[in-house]
């Protein structure tokens, strides 16, 4: 990131983000309480933005925290946002809070991933989903997209794989439109190239006993049972750390009473 920022220059980077967001110099100027002339001067390198203005422009352009550091470096300023590992003592309160959220969601699966979908924490419910997955896919770092879509992962057991796969790939495409991430791009190219299992074809989402789904479910065969889940994703508001800004918690909720009952029964049997 540092090399790219220094080689590209802040003006070119700023213009790239503005074009990604599809807004004009005038609109950005109005949002940031500046002038279109000044924005033009910054983008062409005729003017060096102050740190305050640069951060304001980044905020109005919804630039990710990691890339805000890149903008600051390109303009000759020190990075503002630290990037501490989750094991850092300064993040102990965060880790405790995340662990409590994961435990509180049991017996339903929940996991926390970083910006490249590597799993950094998970609860016992996720272990239920991973039964039968090939051992190499379970080696650290476990990647949520890879383990879901790989032919030796969950993919053969997902009854509505074409629909669920399309949802996941579209999710990654939306992220790639918003961030510049070589690891995420490489992961997308890898998982999008996985072949569908034999006999897997698209079509209507299989209906459960609960009637029409209210959101696209992941319908998966586990231990001779058909379980149905819908997922939610939670991120941090106003993050002040690069690591924290890229964390996302995905929780799976039962989409029908049978799935909820099965997971509760499994919890009673698990020590």
Image (tube, grey):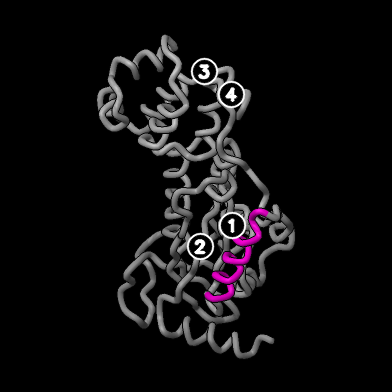
In the image, residue 113 lies in the stretch drawn in magenta: no
Q: Which of marks 4 and 2 is nearer the N terminus?
A: 4
Say what secondary structure mark 1 lies in: helix
Label 4 sits on residue: 4
Q: In this view, does 23 lie to the left or right of 45?
A: left
Residue placed most toward the observer, 89 or 159? 89
Instruction: Give residue 143's position: percent from left, percent from top.
Output: 63, 54
- Please tell me which residue is depicted at 53% across the width and 81% down the height of the picture: 225
The disc at residue 144 is 1
The disc at residue 9 is 3
Name the main secondary structure of what is drawn in magenta. helix
Which image quadrant is residue 56 in? top left
Identify the image quadrant of the C terminus: bottom right
Q: How crowded is mark 4: few (under 14 residues within 10 Å), some or many (20 or more)?
A: few
Label 2 sits on residue: 250
Q: Do the residues labelled 2 and 1 touch (CB within 8 Å)?
A: yes
């Amino acid at each position: 990131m540092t090399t790219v920022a220094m080689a590209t220059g802040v003006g070119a980077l700023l213009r790239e983000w503005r074009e990604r967001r599809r807004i004009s110099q005038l609109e950005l100027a109005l949002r940031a309480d500046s002038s279109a002339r000044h924005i033009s001067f910054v983008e062409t390198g005729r003017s060096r933005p102050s740190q305050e203005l640069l951060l304001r422009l980044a905020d109005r352009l919804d630039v990710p925290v990691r890339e805000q550091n890149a903008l600051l470096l390109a303009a000759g300023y020190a990075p503002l946002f630290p990037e501490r590992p989750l094991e850092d003592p300064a993040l102990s309160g965060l880790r405790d809070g995340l662990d409590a959220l994961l435990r509180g969601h049991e017996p339903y699966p929940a996991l926390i991933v970083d910006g490249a979908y590597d799993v950094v924490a998970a609860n016992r419910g996720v272990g239920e989903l991973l039964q039968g997955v090939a051992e190499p896919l379970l080696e650290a770092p476990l990647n949520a997209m890879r383990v879901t879509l790989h032919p030796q992962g969950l993919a053969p057991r997902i009854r509505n794989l074409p629909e669920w796969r399309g949802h996941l790939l579209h999710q990654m495409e939306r992220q790639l439109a918003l961030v510049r991430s070589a690891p995420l791009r490489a992961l997308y190219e890898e998982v999008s190239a996985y072949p569908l299992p034999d006999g897997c074809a698209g079509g209507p989402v299989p209906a459960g006993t609960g009637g029409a789904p209210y959101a696209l479910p992941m319908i998966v065969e586990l231990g001779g049972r058909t379980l149905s889940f819908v997922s939610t994703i939670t991120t941090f508001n106003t993050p002040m750390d690069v690591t924290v800004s890229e964390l996302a918690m995905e929780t799976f909720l039962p989409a029908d009473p049978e799935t909820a009952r099965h997971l509760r029964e499994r919890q009673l049997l698990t020590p």
